[in-house]
Amino acid sequence: MTTTASAPRRWTRKAVLALAALTAAAAATAFVFTGTQAFAQTATITVATNGNDANPGTVDSPLKTIQAAVDKAAPGTVIQIRGGTYAPSTNIQVNSNGTASAPITMRAYGTEKVVIDGENMPYTPGAVDSSIPRADRGALHVEGDHWRFERLEIIHGPYAIFALDSNNNVYDRLITRDNYESGLHIQGASSNNRIVNLDSYGNRDPRKNGESADGLAIKEGSGTGNTVIGARLWNNADDGFDAWEFLSPIRIEDSVAYGNGYNYWNIPNYSGDGNGFKMGGGDPDPAANHVVVNSMAWKNSAHGFTDNGNPGSMQISRSTAWKNGKTGFDFDSSTSTLTANLAVNNAAPVALGSSTGSGNSWNIKSKWVDADLANTSTSAITGARASDGSIPSTNFLVPKSYPNLGATFV
């Protein structure tokens, strides 16, 4: 059997031009997949510590400052930051908007470690009893919508991130530590923000004697759809999480708060509150029906979980409070529903007031001790995160005889 080679295909000029147009379009609009979503990526801008803001912003010829990249970004732009420490003298202002289908992304390049150090910025720290002008709040000051911030470490800022009237943003696998106010603070008319796998710790505010610096705050505002997943909030001056005067429901799941409210910095006249999860408060106290699922609070100086005067109807389920300085679950100002929660070795297990509940540890038996728990070592849950950024798997604080009671990270 013989075969005949096919003749080479001839391309007309029209076909060549059409192919070139398709190739150019594909290069101009690539797609980035995040989870189950695909986003249009229209451009990539690279920043490096050895760059120059007169450069075009390519990998081989990067920009030097993150602000220059932000100023050039349009919907669909990915700002990729090479490893190193960036220490601007003023905060990075993020004011432009992406879109739902083409958000703007700011992230570390590959697996490289990026640190944004705000020590050179004003108000690091501010003088005692002073106020930080709103525009100066945050090493990253965010007023834009449809942004994604991924795998960045932000330290020593006047807040790490201060987000005002901003919507549809994603804060993914960030570290906000050792700042002179809260680690991540969202305020004002802010909806549909998603905080995923945040580590926020060591934040303090000597200008306010420790009274204000939280690990994560969504406060003094309103907006639906704000969600916190997989946060670890520890050793902050005030609270782990704070929802003071936020009028709309916030959902928290798979998160932990511990060691908050202690004066690790020898701040004079210390006044940190020290709650693990503070779910409201104000003057007057607004009602907001927050939800907490599968979360833990331990060894905070005050309450593990508290409504803090919020008169709303919250849902608190499958959560654990252990060895907190005050009450494990303090919901005596609200009409909340508590289900399948565990309180062990707190100063008091629960304060319900008009709140109700079922299947909680205090409904099962009156006294719980550490011997009832499979594991009281914090080494795994406070250790390195899993490869996907999630909190490590552990049987920490899981009851031996009631495995479906309280939070689990197994």
Image (cartoon, grey):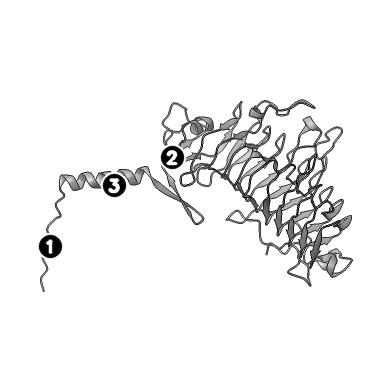
Crowding near the residue tagged with mark 1, few <14, some 14–19, many ≥20 C-alpha atoms within 10 Å:
few
**Residue 89 location in percent, x, y?**
61, 26
Which dot, 1 or 2, sits closer to the camera?
A: 2
Residue sitting at x 51%, y 37%: 97
Q: Which residue is mark 1?
A: 5
Q: Quadrant of residue 179?
A: top right
Mark nearer the viewer, 3 or 1: 3
Looking at the image, tell me whether mark 3 or mark 2 is earlier in sequence order.
3
Report which residue position mark 3 lands on. 22
Q: Position of residue 226 (x, y in %)?
A: 63, 48
Labelled pair 1, 2 in contact (Cβ < 8 Å): no
Q: Amino acid at mark 3?
A: Leu
**Gap in Å between the C-alphas at discs 3 and 2?**
19 Å
Callout 2, which amino acid? Thr
Q: Quadrant of the N terminus?
A: bottom left
Residue 214: x and y, percent? 74, 41
Q: Is residue 70 left or right of residue 3?
A: right
Residue under pointer 2 = 44
